[in-house]
């Protein structure tokens, strides 16, 4: 029987859904088999679709919680004296959801004011599920004495603070002692001490107030206002951090042109439109511009600002005046829209960082880290990188996503990032993004250090006849410069590729860093975060047509990479044929590679050729390869060529909507990693973490 924690709100605006989702994520990060249940659903705001808590859990994890019973139906059943029927349905949903879970998180009901009976129903469900209660309350600006009185009152419904059902409390929206700007995305304020003075109440979490988590998308604004799209731009990507009405002259409104600002102005203020366009051209990622009064931008002005529109600036048009538009925006709910999974993920991650999951695990006597879910993998990744405290160079130092990722890594202690670039430009990019660079993020001006590496590069490449002039020309490229820093041991790893091609990133490493002892080639792997587990795909990015010997080397490298990152290596050599069922040049190559890999590494669980379904699906494996030690449970998939590997990884990534971390290069003496040019900020953060961990096994510096 799993241990059940029932989350009950204490007072209005507790943020119960956010906290419940964050607790699920925190336990999942620890490798706990966790289940989630919302027994009775309550519509909120403009909800017309599925119950949001259940929807978010289903779409951000591998969990399959039961569909909640609608609140009105539950209330009718209790009012008609049919509580037994209601509770029977709840228990059926509970057991169907819990299955083999160690811990079940149950989200209770909030007091909706316009209805009644929520508190009584919560108490009934707590008894029925034999659950322990965790109180959830939002402190915000509430006086502490009043907040604690609410906690005591809510606890009294479950036997009080001592000797009752109440295990502890999670305090939400606690204001940090000082207000300072932080990078968006993964950045988080430091852990706060508990503000409570109640000696009989364990504090399980203290979640800081974070206005960024309330930032809705410009598309949410457009939907709420029923606005006309003058220019769509990055309507679904831009987020609102501040709203400003622009009625003043241009010199007096420049201070409002900041990252995340949603600007409202009368549609006939072409001077304001031009000022906003200049800000967009100056790399300020504004949330958007709303033109009021049903005016349209004159065609010639529209053509003049077209370069600004190409930066992604959304422009909306409404019929109402500026004041009424601002008033309408003030009524926009802070609840996460059902289609905003990115924001739901950010909320879950933020809350999870501030919940004491270990306390809950110890109390539930649940086994720690029993599986490697995607969340647990990413959690381990950043924790291991943090413990190593590595110095990672980022040659694309003025690229906006790279700057934000470096700030996040510095803020979280994942790595000490070195940004190569013009310091003034980097600070400008950071300011435009609303990012504060922490002290442990270094900015190095390439112009000041290039000369010191010329003779060293000439020495390393003298066998190729490289001249000082040629070396100086190569070092004008920051990737070459960063690679030299890595070669000389001044940094522990390099990450590039947000604007450079894979070839641009790898070529200097191949010529300067060289392959590690025992590796024949440099190849790559992706860590594919499937719903139930993380698996490894190789090689999907580097070697177009490996021969059998090279393919065996890729298999061994990929298995070692999996093991290094906590994934038990069971290697499947993928082909269009399983076992001896097919023939042909391509499948023979896979057979030969399998034999060679077994000769080199008899300790590995490795088999091939296997079709993908035989490698991944137990039922198929029992039919196609019943005697295979790998079939049906493979964790490392080695593809026969780049065409197959790259196509498969992209198909799985896009069609199954899974996160793919990589490509991670393997086989180099020192870690160099490539990014996709479409990489998200979190992709860069995780790649930096991967690079830091790879540096644990770095080889000696290359010799000339």
Image: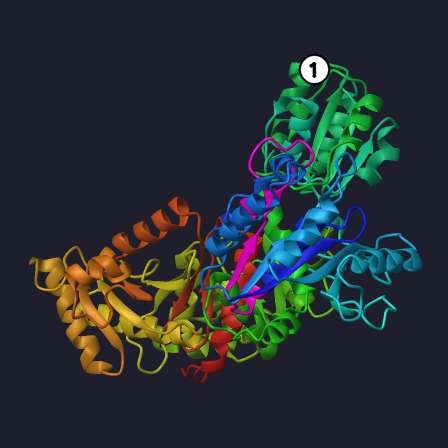
Segment tinted magenta in the rendering: 27-56
* Number of marks: 1
Q: Is residue 12 visible?
A: yes
Which residue sits at x=35%, y=58%? 541
Q: Is residue 337 left or right of residue 547?
A: right
Q: Is residue 112 left or right of residue 513?
A: right
**Quadrant in the picture for residue 606:** bottom left
Which residue sits at x=42%, y=76%? 564
- Judge by depth and name the residue closer to the eye, 358 or 113: 113
**Image quarter hosting the C terminus:** bottom left
- In the displayed structure, 399 sits above or below 699; it is above
Q: Is residue 80 left or right of residue 271?
A: left
- In the displayed structure, 52 sits above or below 636; it is above
- Judge by depth and name the residue closer to the eye, 450 or 221: 221
- Judge by depth and name the residue closer to the eye, 135 or 305: 135
Residue 34 is a magenta residue? yes
- In the displayed structure, 323 sits above or below 78; it is above
Which residue sits at x=87%, y=60%? 148
Q: Position of residue 186 (x, y in %)?
A: 64, 58
Label 1: which secondary element:
loop
Q: Is residue 404 visible?
A: no
Which residue sits at x=16%, y=59%? 623
**Quadrant in the picture for residue 593:** bottom left
**Quadrant in the picture for residue 397:** bottom right
Residue 250 is a magenta residue? no
Q: Residues within 10 Å of mark 1 (few under 14, many from 20)?
A: some
- In the displayed structure, 529 sits above or below 69; it is below
Q: Is residue 651 left or right of residue 455?
A: left
- Judge by depth and name the residue closer to the eye, 545 or 70: 70
Per the image, the residue denoted by label 1 is 296
Q: Position of residue 41 (x, y in %)?
A: 61, 42
Q: Position of residue 499 (x, y in %)?
A: 51, 51
């Amino acid at each position: 029987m799993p241990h059940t924690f029932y989350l009950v709100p204490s007072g209005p605006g507790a943020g119960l859904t956010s906290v419940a989702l964050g607790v699920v994520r925190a336990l999942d990060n620890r490798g706990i088999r966790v289940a989630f249940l919302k027994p009775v659903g309550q519509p909120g705001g403009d909800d017309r679709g599925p119950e949001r808590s259940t929807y978010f859990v289903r779409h951000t994890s591998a969990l399959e919680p039961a569909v909640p019973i609608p609140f009105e139906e539950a209330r009718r059943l209790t009012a008609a004296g049919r509580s037994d029927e209601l509770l029977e349905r709840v228990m059926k949903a509970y057991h169907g959801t819990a299955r083999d879970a160690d811990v079940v998180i149950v989200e209770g009901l909030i007091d909706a004011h316009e209805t009644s009976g929520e508190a009584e129903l919560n108490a009934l469900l707590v008894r029925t599920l034999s659950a322990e209660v965790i109180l959830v309350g939002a402190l915000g600006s509430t006086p502490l004495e009043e907040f604690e009185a609410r906690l005591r009152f809510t606890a009294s419904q479950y036997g009080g603070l001592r000797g009752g059902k109440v295990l502890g409390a999670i305090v939400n929206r606690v204001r940090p002692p000082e207000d300072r700007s932080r990078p968006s995305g993964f950045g988080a304020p430091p852990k706060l001490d508990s503000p409570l003075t109640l000696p009989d109440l364990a504090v399980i979490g203290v979640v800081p107030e974070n206005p960024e988590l309330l930032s809705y998308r410009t598309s949410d604004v457009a939907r709420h206002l029923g606005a006309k799209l003058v220019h769509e731009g990055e309507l679904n990507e831009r987020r609102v951090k501040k709203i400003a009405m622009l009625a003043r002259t241009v010199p007096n409104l420049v201070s409002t042109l900041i990252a995340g600002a949603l600007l409202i102005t009368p549609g006939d203020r072409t001077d304001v439109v031009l000022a906003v366009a200049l800000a967009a051209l100056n790399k300020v990622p504004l949330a958007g511009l709303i033109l009021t009064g049903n005016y349209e931008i004159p065609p010639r002005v529209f053509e003049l600002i077209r370069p600004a529109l190409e930066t992604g600036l959304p422009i909306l048009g409404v019929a109402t005046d500026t004041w009424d538009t601002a008033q309408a925006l003030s009524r926009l709910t802070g609840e996460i829209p059902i289609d905003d999974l990115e924001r739901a993920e950010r909320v879950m991650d933020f809350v999870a960082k501030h919940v004491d999951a270990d306390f809950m695990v110890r109390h539930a006597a649940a086994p720690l880290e029993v599986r490697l879910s995607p969340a647990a993998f990413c959690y381990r990744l950043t924790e291991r990188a943090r413990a190593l405290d590595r110095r990672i160079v980022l040659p694309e130092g003025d690229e906006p996503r790279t700057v934000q990722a470096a700030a996040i890594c510095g803020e979280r202690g994942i790595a000490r990032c070195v940004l190569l670039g013009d310091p003034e430009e980097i600070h400008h990019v950071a300011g435009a993004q609303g990012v504060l660079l922490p002290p442990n993020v270094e900015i190095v001006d390439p112009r000041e250090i290039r000369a010191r590496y010329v003779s060293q590069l000439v020495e390393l490449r003298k066998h190729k006849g490289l001249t000082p002039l040629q070396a100086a020309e190569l070092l004008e490229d920051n990737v070459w410069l960063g690679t030299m820093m890595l070669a000389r041991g001044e940094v522990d790893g390099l990450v590039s590729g947000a604007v450079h091609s894979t070839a641009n990133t790898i070529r200097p490493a191949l010529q300067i860093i060289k392959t590690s002892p025992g590796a024949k080639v440099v190849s790559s792997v992706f860590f594919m975060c499937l719903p139930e587990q993380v698996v490894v795909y190789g090689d999907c990015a580097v070697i177009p047509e490996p021969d059998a010997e090279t393919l065996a080397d890729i298999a061994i490298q990929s298995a070692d990479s999996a093991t290094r990152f906590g994934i038990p290596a069971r290697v499947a050599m993928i082909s269009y044929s399983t076992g001896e069922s097919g023939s042909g040049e391509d499948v023979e190559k896979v057979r030969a590679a399998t034999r060679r890999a077994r000769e080199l590494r008899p300790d590995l669980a490795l088999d091939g050729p296997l079709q993908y379904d035989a490698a991944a699906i137990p039922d198929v494996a029992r039919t196609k390869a019943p005697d295979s030690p790998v079939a049906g449970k493979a964790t490392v998939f080695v593809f026969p060529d780049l065409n197959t590997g790259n196509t498969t990884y992209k198909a799985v990534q896009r069609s199954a909507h899974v996160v793919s971390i990589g490509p991670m290069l393997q086989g180099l003496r020192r870690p160099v990693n490539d990014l996709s040019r479409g990489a998200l900020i979190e992709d860069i953060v995780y790649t930096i973490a991967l690079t830091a961990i790879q540096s644990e096994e770095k080889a000696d510096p290359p010799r000339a």
